[in-house]
Image (tube, rainbow, N blue to C red):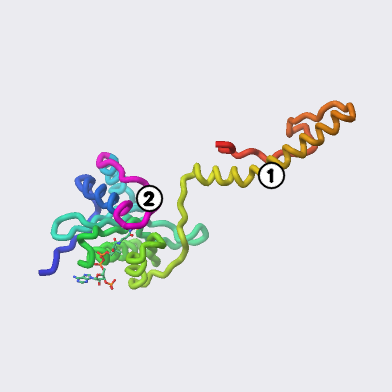
Amino acid sequence: MAAAIEVRDAQRGDADALVALWREMTTGSGHPLRLPAPPTAAAVEVAVGKHLDDPFGRLLVGELDGAVHGMAYLRRTAISPLHDDFTVTVEYLHVSDAARRHGLGKALIAEAAAWAEHENCAHLAAVAPAIAREANRFLARLGLGQAGVLRFATTHTVRRRLAAEHAPNLLALLSSRRSVIARRAQLGRPPLTLDPGAADVSFPAAPESAGT
Ligand SMILES: CC(C)(COP(=O)(O)OP(=O)(O)OC[C@H]1O[C@@H](n2cnc3c(N)ncnc32)[C@H](O)[C@@H]1OP(=O)(O)O)[C@@H](O)C(=O)NCCC(=O)NCCS
């Protein structure tokens, strides 16, 4: 007999199942995904309540024979900053290893397509890690072509990298300032101020995270 499949909006009581799915998604895939660590069940209960009240987002769960084995987060957003059209984007699509190839993945995408149609969204998008071959093949077979690569890092990491890139310029500028000051001292002239506002050379603003 075919397994019974149901897709519905997540409820607070699904918190434990959602934590387990998140844990499997982030650790069980065999390849590191840059995703946050699993949240607590209490935090998930709060998040689920928020999604139930959100007209622009839905957190779906998929049940196989009465047990939650899949999830997907749907977001309804403008397709670009310059267009009025809306798109539904499927994120964090995941079906547990034990429940794959029973139709749960397609049922979750079908619900996304139904919501997009209901909300008059002409487009559907899905986010999947570039290295997740199974998910990408699955999405490609449903007609979803690759449109971009999502890159992810902590804000702190990006600011550190930016600071590292600016540092050589700043060091070169400081070093040339020191030679000018030394030359002026040799000629018996008063030293130049290092106040950038008063100097004839302007200093680039150091990023807040410089040196961290
Ligand atoms: C991609 C993914 C969502 C698919 O879920 P799924 O539940 O296995 O999907 P389905 O069962 O609907 O479809 C998978 C295949 O099984 C087939 N299938 C469905 N029911 C079947 C059945 N009863 N018997 C045999 N095959 C079946 C489908 O036709 C489909 O084949 P196709 O892709 O060649 O068309 C799942 O593999 C997954 O979660 N992968 C990891 C995702 C990931 O990396 N997430 C990271 C964050 S986004």
Q: Is residue 60 left or right of residue 208?
A: left
Image coordinates of residue 59 in percent, x first then y, are 29, 53
User: Residue 23 at x, y = what percent?
Assistant: 28, 49
What residue appears at the point 22 percent right and 46 percent down from the top-left corner? Answer: 16
What's the amino acid at mark 1?
A: Asn
Q: Are marks 1 and 2 in contact (CB under 8 Å)?
A: no
Q: Specify the quadrant that holds the C terminus.
A: top right
| Ligand 1 picture quarter | bottom left
- Which contiguous range is marked in magenta? 25-42
Does the beta carbon of the residue at mark 1 sit less than 8 Å from ligand 1? no
The answer to whether any part of residue 74 appears in the image is: no
Label 1 CA crowd tier, 10 Å (few <14, some 14–19, many 20+)? few
Mark drawn on residue 67: none
| Amino acid type of the residue tagged 2 in the rendering | Leu
Of 133 and 115, the residue lying toward us: 133
Mark 2, residue position: 35
Secondary structure under badge 2? loop
Q: State which quadrant residue 37 falls in.
A: top left
Q: Main secondary structure of the magenta part?
A: loop
- The front one of 70 and 194 is 194
When the figure is inspected, residue 181 is found, relative to residue 36, above or below; the finding is above
In the rendered structure, which disc, 1 or 2, sits on the residue that comes first in sequence?
A: 2
Q: CA distance from mark 1 to mark 2?
A: 34 Å
